[in-house]
Image (cartoon, rainbow, N blue to C red):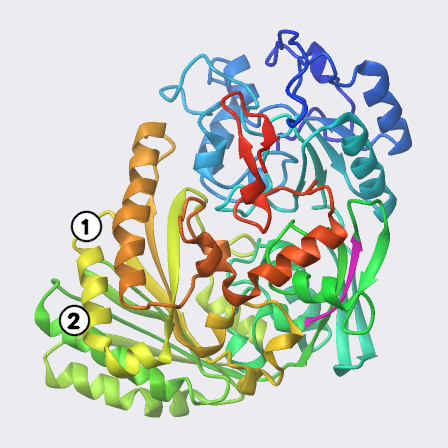
Amino acid sequence: MMLAQALFGLTLLSGSSFAAYIPRADPPANCKVLPGDAKWPGTKEWSRLNETLGGRLIANVPLAKECHDSNFESQTCKNLQDQWIFTPPHMQDPASPMAPYFQNNTCSPFPNVNPGKCTLGNSPAYSINVAKAEDAVAGVKFAKKHNIRLVVKNTGHDYLGRSNGQGALSLWTHNLKSIDFLDSYSNSKYTGSAVKMGAGVQGYDVLAAAEKSKKRIVAGYCPTVGVVGGYTQTSGFSALSASYGLGADQALEWEVVTTEGEHLFASPDKNADLYWALSGGGAGAYAIAISLIAKTHSDGKVAGAVLSLNHTMSDTFFNAFAFWQTQLLTLNQLPGFMSAFQTTQTTFAINFISWPGHDSSEVEKELVPFTNYLKAHNLTYNLALSDDPTFVDHFKRYEENLPYGPFSISDLITSRLIPQKVVETNVNALTNSYREILADKRFMVGGAAFNASNARVGNVPADNAVLPAWRDATVYVYSMTPFKPQTDSMETLAGLYKAIDTFVQPKLSAVTPGSGAYMNEASFSNPNWKADYFGANYEKLLEVKRKYDPEFLLYGKPNPGHEFFEVASDGRLCRVK
């Protein structure tokens, strides 16, 4: 796997053939410096930082540089082309984001896309391979001293581009991989078993470890998502969320470094305001996560099912789709029952059902009203039931190509949380909004249905910063469209985002006034970001931001405080308010 210059070696950016920077005068005082500015740190400063870090400073190179060096003919380049739309090459690289908009085709591995150009573009100039809290402290101090933009990257799963920044110094926490199971942990809100995870632990890491310990943990359906990073910090949901709540509901204690260089621990009992914000209030906004202690749960049997059918966008199908939505009102009242669905212009599927502690015969019984409806309306379906002894066995059954999964990084997405009241009183309008979106063949519609109410989870709204709309949602709905980095231009990409923001999102929002969206799977350019992503929590989150990051060193759109900044035409970050 091609990483940045032998990964841990220091190759100074000033000598790199792919980034010949022309010296510039000092930027405005309200702006960050970029490579080539007179005040950009010189070789000696970067070397001293590298010494402080024990050699863990990385001068980033574009992930696809090898392709341009070899005229796209090397085996390394061909391997990268095959893997480019999947997670492994990007999560193992200290700078490459998993989002085509932020990759910006500035160094594509494909010869027909922006040929002859290979620069870092929007990516950080340097990364620190964080191995301990002191590394993050050193990075924070260096960025502040030299007025350099600071970003945090874990895996790079980020539709919003928060882990990216031109000319930035990145704190790369991906290799903080420790996992320690605790038989007993207690604070004022919880007593029970737990797991302490380094910030770089991914879903497939901890799921495998949990199975060996006969435990379960709430982690993302995409197994390469970092559990401690944007997943838990921006709520996060799972096939187990109907049983135990959202990812943020599992958080017990955060270990962080602040932008003041402090190494802190945050829980309901210490630095409680920071704990609150980190647990659902947005990623990379308040402090740099080093580790997390989270709840674990006893393992056991899990029942499951999948159902699929073909359709032709007929009234008959959409009436059945509306009926399925109403069935979710009943199914969500079953403790632990979670379902996920997806539909295109030609197919509908319940991708999986998860029901821990139950048997497949019970799942089949609960589906009878829906399957009877399908039969009565001559909609032919396939149903497959399953029983597994553990959650990981169940997960493996419905997840492909583990440990990485089948997920493409080139899809564009937006989402909406559908309140229970809308399903109860306005399901036809809701279903019609899906139908109108699906009429554009570029888009599909999917969702996950589960009950994450405070009553089900066993907490109160003040316990964390989870968007309140999660608590009364019957279903989380998303709409997705693919981007083809092998052939598509940035103009095509811009057109797709325009369709998301002006066509898809308004359709979903119009029928769900006052609700919100899942920020991790949403549009970075949503004009209603404050209400949709933070709701009533926003002002309090901004207060926490001001307290622990008073200079707003951690910038990320659409995190709290980003509205005080803009990215100038040359890529530099500037404060405007």
Residue at 43% from the left image edge and 89% from the top image edge: 333
**Residue range highlighted in magenta:** 251-256
Label located before the other in sequence (1 or 2): 2
Q: Looking at the image, can residue 573 be seen?
A: yes
In the image, what residue type sits under mark 1? Asp
In the image, what residue type sits under mark 2? Phe
Q: Nearer the viewer, residue 164 or 224?
A: 164
Whole-percent x and y of residue 420?
36, 80
Residue that sits furthest to the top in the current view: 22
Vertical placement of 131 versus 444: above or below? Answer: above
Whole-percent x and y of residue 249?
63, 73
Q: Name the element at disc 1.
A: loop
Q: Name the element at disc 2.
A: helix
Do the residues bearing badges 1 and 2 touch, measured as CB atoms within 8 Å?
A: no
Whole-percent x and y of residue 539?
59, 60
- 343 left or right of 25? left
Vertical placement of 21 versus 204: above or below? Answer: above
Q: Looking at the image, can residue 389 be seen?
A: no
Q: Which residue is mark 1?
A: 440
Residue at 65% from the left image edge and 28% from the top image edge: 30
Residue that sits furthest to the front in the current view: 577
Q: Main secondary structure of the magenta part?
A: strand
Residue at 76% from the left image edge and 38% from the top image edge: 129
Which quarter shows the N terminus?
top right
Q: Which residue is mark 2?
A: 318
- 442 left or right of 178? left
Vertical placement of 387 versus 224: above or below? Answer: below
- 419 left or right of 428? right
Q: Is residue 438 magenta?
A: no
Quarter of the view holding residue 44: top right
Q: Classify 10 Å Cα crowding around label 1: few (below 14), some (14-19), many (20 and above).
A: some
Whole-percent x and y of residue 352?
40, 72
